Image (tube, rainbow, N blue to C red):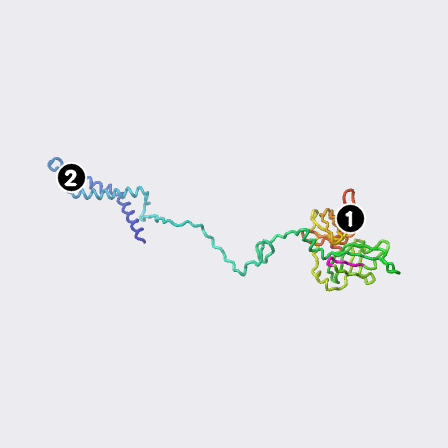
Amino acid sequence: MKHKELLVRVFAFTGHIWKRIWVVVILPIWLRAFCVYKLENKDNKKEIEKPFYKREAFVVSTIVFSIFMLVGIIQLSNNTETPSGSEIIIPPTPTPTQQTLPVTPTKKIPFADLPKCDPAIEHCANSPVQSIPQEKSIADVVTEWTPRVPLVVCMWRNPNTGQSIQIGRGSGTIYNFIDGFKVITNRHVLVSEQYGAPNDCTAIFPQNKDFTVYFKDRSMQAGTLEDYGYLKLPNDPDLSKFNNNLKVCSSNSVNIGDKLVVLGYPVIGGNYGITATEGIISAIEPDYYVTGAKIDHGNSGGAAILIKDNCYLGIPSSSKVGEIESMGRILKASFVIN
C-alpha cells in the first residue's frame, strides 16, 4: 500500500473516531478544567472545590479539543461519512489521465490473402465485395461486333454465258459451328423467287477479306419455314480470330423496353462501311422480337445485339410499314444457333 494512501486512511479513521467521541470525553474534560480555572482565579476568593486539573490541564485540553474539532469539521465538509461496519472504505484518489477512445481489436489479414484486383471495378475472387456489371455504350458494342458482320453479295448467272442476271445483297454474322465457320444470313438473301438458289455468294468482311462460296459445292443452306440461311466458309487462317464464339442471349433475360442495336449494310445506309440503327424491344413473339429499330433492304441478315448483356439476339429479318413508321422483326437466335 502506498504511503499516501495509508496516511489518508489513518487521517480519515482518526477523524471518524474522534468526531464522535469528543462530545463524550474531550468536551466534559475541557468544561471541567475551565470551570476549575475560573473558580481558582475569581477575585482571590477561597477555593470552593479542590481542582481536579491545574492550569496546564486546561491549556492542553483546549489544544486537543481544537485539533479534533477541526478534524471533524474537515471530514464533514468533505462528506466522507463511512458506512457502519468494521471496514472503512476510502475511495481512491483519482489521477488525471488523458481521455482516449476505446480501441476494438481487429484481425490482421495476411498480405497473401488480399484480393489482387479492385472489387469496385471488376470481380475479385474470394472478395466480399461483388462488382456490378456496367452496361456498355452503343459505340463500344458496335466496335466489338463490327468485325463479325460481313456484307453478303449473291449472283445469279446465265448458265450458258456466265453473265449475271440478278444480284442480291444482304448482311450476315459469322459463327463458329461444330462443322466449321458459317455466315448466318436470311433465306430471302440466298433464294430468289424467280431463279431459286444463286450460283455463288461472297462474304465481304470489314477487314477487306472476302470469301466466295458456290452452290455446286453445297456450301449454302436455307431454312424451309423461317427466314434464315447459311454460307459455309472455306478453311482459312484469318478466321481463327473468331474461334471464341459470340454470346447468345437467353430468352429469359430479354424484356420489352430493352435497348438493342442492329448492324448491317442497308442500301440507304453508309456507302463505305457498316451502319448501326438502334431501338428497343417493342414486343416479344414466340419466334420473333419486334423492334422499332430500322431494318431496311440490305441490313437484314446482319446482327441484332442486346445492349444490356452485349449478346446476340438474332437475325434482323424484315419490317412492316404502318401508317406512321415501320416495325422490324428479329428472328430469335435459337433458330439458327441450336
Placement of 174 over or under 319, stated as above or below: below
Tag 1 secondary structure: strand
Q: Residue at x 28, y 45 (%)?
A: 15
Image spot of residue 124 (x, y percent): 59, 57
Q: Quarter of the image for the N terminus: give it.
A: bottom left
198 or 49, nearer to the observer? 198
Q: Earlier in the sequence, mark 2 or mark 1?
A: 2
Secondary structure type for disc 2: helix
Picture residue at 69% right of the left edge, 60% below the top: 244
Magenta-colored stretch includes residue 310 = no
**Can you identify the residue that label 1 sits on?**
319
Task: Say if the magenta span includes residue 203.
Answer: yes
Identify the residue shown where x is 57% and y is 59%: 116
In the foreground, 283 or 214: 214
Amino acid type shown at disc 1:
Ser
x%, y% of residue 298?
Answer: 78, 52
Question: What's the CA distance linking mark 2 and mark 1?
Answer: 135 Å
Q: Hey, which quadrant is residue 190 in on the image?
A: bottom right
**Mark 2 = which residue?**
37
Residue type, mark 2 in image: Tyr
* 11 left or right of 206 in image: left
Q: Residues within 10 Å of mark 1 (few under 14, many from 20)?
A: many
- Residue 10 pos. (x, y %): 28, 49
Work out whether residue 103 can be spotted: yes
Q: Nearer the viewer, residue 257 or 285?
A: 257
Magenta region, residue range:
201-207
